[in-house]
Amino acid sequence: MSPIASPSDTDALPVPKRRTPRRFTQVQRLGGWLRRMAFLVHRWLGIALALLMAVWTLSGIVMMYVSYPETTAAERAAGLDALDLSQCCAAAGLPEGPLERVSVEMLLGQPVLRVMTEAGPVTLGLRDGAPLAVGENEARQVAATHYRNTTGHDAAVAIEPVDVDQWTLQLRRYAPLYKASMGDAAGSELYVSGLTGEIVQDTTRRERFWNWLGAVPHWLYFTALRKDGALWSEVVIYASQLGTCLTLTGIYIGLRMFRRGPRWTPLRGIAMWHHWTGLVFGLVTLTWVFSGFASMQPWGWLEGEGAGQEIEAMAGRAIEPRDVVDFAAALAAHPQSGVVSAELAMQQGRPWAIVAGRDGARIRASLPNLADAAPDDAGLAALSRAARPGAEPVSQGLITEGDAYHYSHHSTPAVLPAWRAIWADAGAPRLYLDPRTGEPVGFVDAGSRGFRWWHSALHRLDFAPLRDRPLWDAVMLALLAGVAVLSLLGVWMGIRRLRRNERV
């Protein structure tokens, strides 16, 4: 017989308590939403950008050892013939307007006057005073002369007109251009300006190969994109901004997940390794992607005013046609052995000649006798004071070692010793002069100072204790390898996530 429950039995049964729902404040709800958004933003930005971040990192390793091709002033000088003004000089019809720079060189076997104006460069023959025409045949001769002077060998030159290619994207102001293939074992190619007859670019097969793995992907420097400078700039700026956001959200997530639960990380497999590498290399990743953003000087940030006003003040006055006539006559009257180029320089209202040898060494010479006239300390101090009238430098003198703003960095040598002048007014500007010639070789103002620290220091680890090799190589390679692993793990996680979505 079934037992019948009595009232006392019923009262003894436990009654479950109703759980009161937890109430969240608006701040707590907002915080939770932001945390969820951080995870989502990091996930989908990682899917979109992790491969690009890996490419930036790996190409940075290449750029440590192979820089973008560039024809330096010293390389140009090495390819020039020695000055011969024995049949000089006809009255050249100088262009109207201010003359910003005037120099004399040899071109196609005759002396020429190179003049830089506000409208661009002009090249005039000094034998007849007429502008020089440079076509394919002339470009071939220019390239052959340069190659013979720099290597000691002749070459069978093949000439090809080019509009713009991967290695001349910033040289369109010298158009038309001619590419001269030298046919040597190094695969040397020279670019000759049809406007001025100058060698404006040189590359080798090795440089071209490694730059396709280095500077080109690192700068997103693809011809089709870089032709439109404004579009290229926007792409780089916004890609690096998104990369910064990706890194910041990753650092936040990595710290939030650290020691969450009984283990150091709650993650497993690839996600665990991504978490660990992010904790170790997240900060350096942030500094590199943000300093890459800073390199573009976006929207005027970190742009300095430059030394234009200081250079004009040091000159004292503009170059006049009479100065050019006297300059050419002095060069004709006083032949200088080993000189391949001479530039007319105006300093404190007085004209001087800056002459250069084939080794690229430059000295200042007086006019009209072309005697060696390197400025002494008093002359350099006077130039410094003239650069900023009414503002006396608080410090000036010769430096024999680099400082925080004027220093050599691997493939970029600085002129040393140098004369340095420092002012205490707004921006604490610094001016560096070449003590051999009195020419400015460096200038620092508020914008360039910010660029030095926000870009150069962070992007290349340009700190004095780290600049010396092989220490710099060891530190950079270790950090770049860590960031590369972090990015590649992110790529693999993104691929797995997309595959999972496909299966669903």
Image: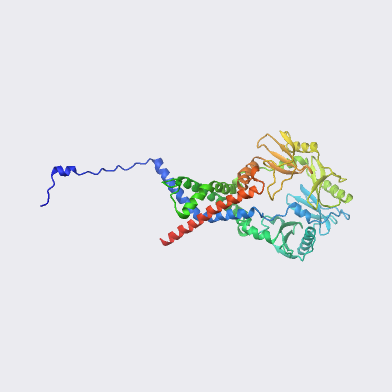
Task: Say if 490 sits above or below 398 in the image.
Answer: below
Q: Left of 259 or right of it: where is 368? A: right
Q: Could you say which quadrant of the image residue 59 lies in? A: bottom right
148 or 474, nearer to the observer: 474
Residue drawn at the location 43% of the way across and 49% of the way down: 266
Give left or right: position of 53 versus 191: left
Report the side of 185 relative to 281 (left or right).
right
Residue 41 % position (x, y): 47, 50
Q: How many marks?
A: 0
What residue lies at 54% left-to-right and 54% top-to-bottom? 485
Q: Quadrant of the C terminus?
A: bottom left
Q: Residue at x 17, y 42 (%)?
A: 11
Whether residue 245 appears in this view of the structure is: no
Residue 459 on image: x %, y %: 61, 47
Residue 376 in picture, x, y percent from top left: 81, 38
From the top left corner, tell me how far across and down residue 291 is, in percent.
59, 47
Residue 309 shows in the view: yes
**How was this image coloured?**
rainbow
